[in-house]
Image (spheres, helix red, strand yellow):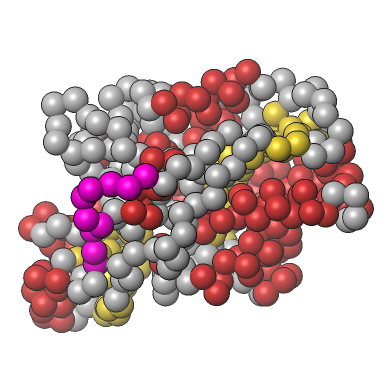
Amino acid sequence: MRLLLSVSLIAAALAMAPVRFDREKVFRVKLTDEKQATIIKDLAKAMELDFWYPDATHHVTANMTVDFRAREEDAEAIKTAMERNQMHYMPCQPQSGPSSESSPSCTGAKGVGKQDERKTSIFMDCGIHAREWISPAFCQWFVYQATKSYGKNKIMTKLLDQMNFYVLPVFNVDGYIWSWTKNRLWRKNRSKNENSKCVGTDLNRNFNVSWNSFPNTRNPCQDVYRGAAPESEKETKAVSDFIRSHLPSLKAYITFHSYSQMLLFPYGYTHRLAPDHESLNKVAKIGAEALATRYETRYIYGPIASTIYPTSGSSLDWAYDVGIKHTFAFELRDKGKFGFLLPESQIKSTCKETMLAVKFIAKYILKHAC
């Protein structure tokens, strides 16, 4: 097996003070009809709301639970508007920064098992969105367990000897560092945008698949900004080039996000079912069941568009359309109690249960790869 860890994290001292969220509010709102959905959209137009779920205003619909962050000075007006319209909501308090003062560890290239680039391969990435900290934690856990258990655990040893795992532990390095040092809830990368004061591109809207189909991704000041062109970002381009150069051996692509407890597969840019829908649904179902055996954590599964919300330019849809049949996206813990601020106490259990699902998918790919 080959484990490819292709990034190094360097914590830099920056002059600007970290963004704090001590008095800001996160609201969870259960919308019962279109009138309530419209109220939330109108509030978003009048105030600076940071949507956590869904990730953009236009995805807000009736019969949906919505999570968003609001400034302290807007909180009372928001509560008044929701109470006046009999909307059920639950407020919570976001944390202001990372739980530890230590910076992310540096990671180099590492190989375990029998080396052969022609072997059946899986590409895995974590941390495409900066604030989803549990995602890079899992990729690092996976690498740690792979190196630790090789030669001791029969299943893992077999997988490592007969497959290559290419693991990118932090896709969005600059954004991830920014979320640790300046703004805990930062999502995009840190690239500059021409003719705009707003910084960053959503790397998961920057892949060359239905890239220009959603109008809400065209504003550089939005969290879901698609970028100037497909693969305009160095991170997206590097991953795309690597995958294209290894396509003959790549049989699966798995990307890790948070939060929602979902196991997703194509498509996101259309409600049309993928040609391999039946197989993808079967693997996702058994993968979700395998994950639940550890702590009874329940995941739902299905196509992106119908299970979470429609999206364009995603790595998952792109990987599938370039020819990788088995492509999956994990939305890790939780369902919204902590959201992106998952406590440190849940890291280990999240990684352990996710490892069960990934090992199942890998065994399935090994058995059924052409």
Residue 200 in magenta stretch: no
**Which region shows up in magenta?**
12-21
Residue 113's spot in the image, x, y percent? 84, 38
Q: Is residue 204 visible?
A: yes
Residue 198's spot in the image, x, y percent? 18, 38
With 304 as the anchor, is 219 left or right in this view? left
Please identify the residue farthest to the top as the structure is shown.
245
Main secondary-structure element of the magenta-colored stretch:
loop
Quadrant position of the C terminus in the picture? top right
Q: Is residue 368 visible?
A: no
Is residue 112 or residue 187 the one in the foreground? 112
Quadrant position of the N terminus in the picture? top right
Is residue 283 or residue 349 the one in the foreground? 349
Residue 349's spot in the image, x, y percent? 63, 69
**Residue at 74% over, 25% down:** 249
Is residue 336 or residue 8 the one in the foreground? 8
Residue 302's spot in the image, x, y percent? 56, 52
Q: Quadrant of residue 90?
A: bottom left
**Residue at 46% over, 54% down:** 103
With 103 as the anchor, is 156 left or right in this view? right
Task: Tell me: residue 126, above or below residue 7.
Answer: below
**Residue at 76% over, 49% down:** 146
